[in-house]
Image (tube, helix red, strand yellow):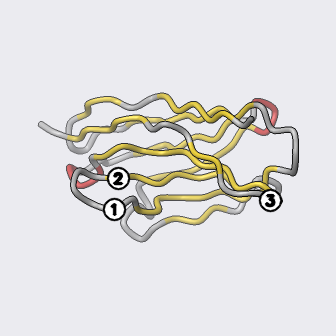
Amino acid sequence: QVQLVESGGGLVQPGGSLKLSCVSSGRIFGNRMEMGWYRQAPGKEREFVAEIVWNSGNAYYDDSVKGRFTISRDSAKNTVFLQMNNLKPEDTGVYYCYEKPSMGPRDWGRGTQVTVSS
């Protein structure tokens, strides 16, 4: 059973930075195709943030975070990162890591809270 464990969330002032990590373990069937992040603010639907194609390293971002967030991966450690700079109050939410396999449904982590407030 695949497990995704996020870390790195916390409280930060506007303009500050945080780096999220997500470690994947337990994959037996299929290959890891993409990993990425969604977020969910209070009272809102979960929304896409960023994704990285595991083999190529190609990255995709929501327009709201382009130029401020950077997604990367460490293939040897089965880990995906989200470097978040120039954080804004509207970035506040629970950030969920996901993994898309070559077969089967997407797997999700439990989330890590990011709060941007002065």
Q: CA distance from mark 3 to mark 2?
A: 27 Å
Type of the residue with mark 2 = Gln
The tag earlier along the polypeptide, 2 or 1, is 2
Q: Which mark is residue 56?
A: 3
Type of the residue with mark 3 = Ser
Count of numbered marks? 3
| Quadrant housing residue 12 | top left
Q: Position of residue 53 (x, y in %)?
A: 73, 59
Image height of 1 relative to 47, above or below? above
**Residue located beneath label 2 in the image:** 40
**Considering depth in this image, is 45 or 48 the residue closer to the camera?**
45
Q: Residue at x 52, y 33 (%)?
A: 6
For label 1, the crowd category at 10 Å Cα-Cα, with few meaning under 14, some 14 to 19 and many 20 or more, is: few
Label 1 element class: loop
Label 2 element class: strand
Image height of 19 relative to 72, above or below? above
For label 2, the crowd category at 10 Å Cα-Cα, with few meaning under 14, some 14 to 19 and many 20 or more, is: some
**Considering depth in this image, is 117 or 4 the residue closer to the camera?**
4
Q: CA distance from mark 2 to mark 1?
A: 6 Å
For label 3, the crowd category at 10 Å Cα-Cα, with few meaning under 14, some 14 to 19 and many 20 or more, is: few
The tag earlier along the polypeptide, 3 or 2, is 2
**Residue located beneath label 1 in the image:** 45
Q: CA distance from mark 1 to mark 3?
A: 30 Å
Q: Residue at x 58, y 65 (%)?
A: 60
Camera-nearest label, 3 or 2: 2
Tell me the quarter of the image containing the N terminus. top right
The extreme left residue here reads 118
